[in-house]
Amino acid sequence: MSRLLVEADGGSRGNPGPAGYGAVVRDALSGRVLAEAAESIETATNNVAEYQGLIAGLAKAAELDPDAEVEARLDSKLVVEQMSGRWKIKHPGMRPLAQRARDIAATFASVRYTWVPRAKNEHADRLANEAMDAAAEGRPVRLAPPDETGPGAEEPGPVAPATPDSGDTGPAGSAPPAGDAGAAPSSTGWLAPDTTPTKLLLLRHGETPLSAEKRFAGAGDIALTELGHAQARAAARRLAGRGIDTIVSSPLRRARDTAAHVARELSLTVRVDDGFREVDFGEWEGKTFAEVRRENPADLERWLADPDVAPPGGESFASAMRRVGEARDKLLARHRAETVLIVSHVTPIKTLLQTAMLAPPQALYRMHLDVGCLSEIDCFSDGPMVVRSMNDTAHLA
């Protein structure tokens, strides 16, 4: 009986937007690629595209050996948990897709679903991004012949064990524990990585009236103060010599206005990504911490104790972490080995730092970021991320 690995991924530019998926089937023992699939979808959500990638991968595996033992690896926590039966499928649009995947899976001797970090799903991720690019440009996907090498091409070799699914909150990911026999030595971050990193420069927006008074500022579209504009101009001057290739901003006004100062200094344009917006604080928006503690002490304590708990009418940190992780992973796939400036807010920047350091979600409560501060992360294509700096305010002195 053969053993096959199915690696699948999918995504969209806009969620929903131009979408696509990619899938790879490998021999589980040798790691040799046996089949590939990729297809554009005119308009779809990330979740639809991810399910379509799984379906395509399972279908390719069934063509090769319908009696095989199959392991399906995806970097979508949602799809893995739903297909494993641990999470309910609440969205009615997902149920037919999940059923199609189950119908194909039923033909195999066995199928198990494993979550892996995006860095361990690079081949399928590359195919999915090529399909998304094709969808955005209104053209068919063009896959390289099987024997053609190129970006992301891999030599056959043994397949490393997948990172165990340890109940992570989402695609932000986690590395194997130290000493894990399946972990590459460079995953600890102590050894010199052998690839050129993608540099993420993280700029928190300048001062706003709410930040000056230390009030919750989430989804509200708040303008910068005069000092905030001055802080943004100072950051722009600081960043002028950093060789920035791309500027990505949260859609909220305070971030866009900060990014605009940098863009003018560097003669670049700004791309807006909703994934990097601030968490929604719901009913706490505009209030101080003391006011919330006085008015809603029980809600505040639950929120502080559990990242899955949202403020009344708002968004949980866990939900925001999944959103930010997805946005980061798609950005890394799109801008490999470039220097990217992300202009964002406290929660998204803390999330990027927390996941880079493999710290628990509770670490979000143990970081401080000043308005206008800079942080930096090196992201290596072979897995590890290294925090180079955090809360750097030298340019504001």
Image (cartoon, helix red, strand yellow):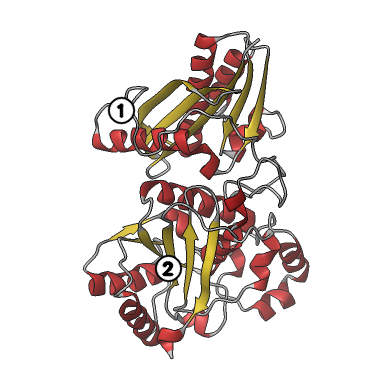
Task: Please tell me which residue lies in front, 356 or 136.
Answer: 356
Neighbour tally class for label 2: few under 14, some 14-19, many 20 plus, Cα within 10 Å: few
Q: Which of marks 1 and 2 precedes in the sequence?
A: 1
Tell me residue 49's x, y (percent). Answer: 46, 32
Instruction: Tell me residue 122's x, y (percent).
Output: 47, 39
| Residue 163 in which image quadrant | top right
User: Up-down: is 330 above or below 134?
Assistant: below
Q: Quadrant of residue 297?
A: bottom right
Instruction: Using the rendered image of the protein, determine whether residue 82 is visible from the camera's viewpoint.
Output: yes
Q: Quadrant of the C terminus?
A: bottom left
Q: CA distance from mark 2 to mark 1?
A: 39 Å
Q: Quadrant of residue 291?
A: bottom right
Secondary structure of the residue carrying numbered label 1? loop
Q: CB under 8 Å between callouts 2 and 1?
A: no
**x%, y% of residue 91?**
57, 33
Question: Which mark's residue is nearer the viewer, 2 or 1?
Answer: 1
| Disc marking residue 236 | none
User: 215 left or right of 381?
Assistant: right
* Location of the N terminus (image quadrant): top right
Q: Is residue 67 left or right of residue 339?
A: right
Which residue does the numbered mark 1 point to in the structure image? 141
Query: Which sits in the foreground, 387 or 331?
Result: 387
Find the residue positioned furthest to the bottom: 397
**What's the residue at 43%, 62% (across, down)?**
200
Report whether 86 appears left or right of 38. Answer: right
| 392 displayed left or right of 102 | left
Q: x and y percent of residue 140 in the render? A: 27, 26
Which residue is tagged 2? 221
Q: Let me know if residue 316 appears in the view.
A: no
Amino acid tagged 2:
Asp
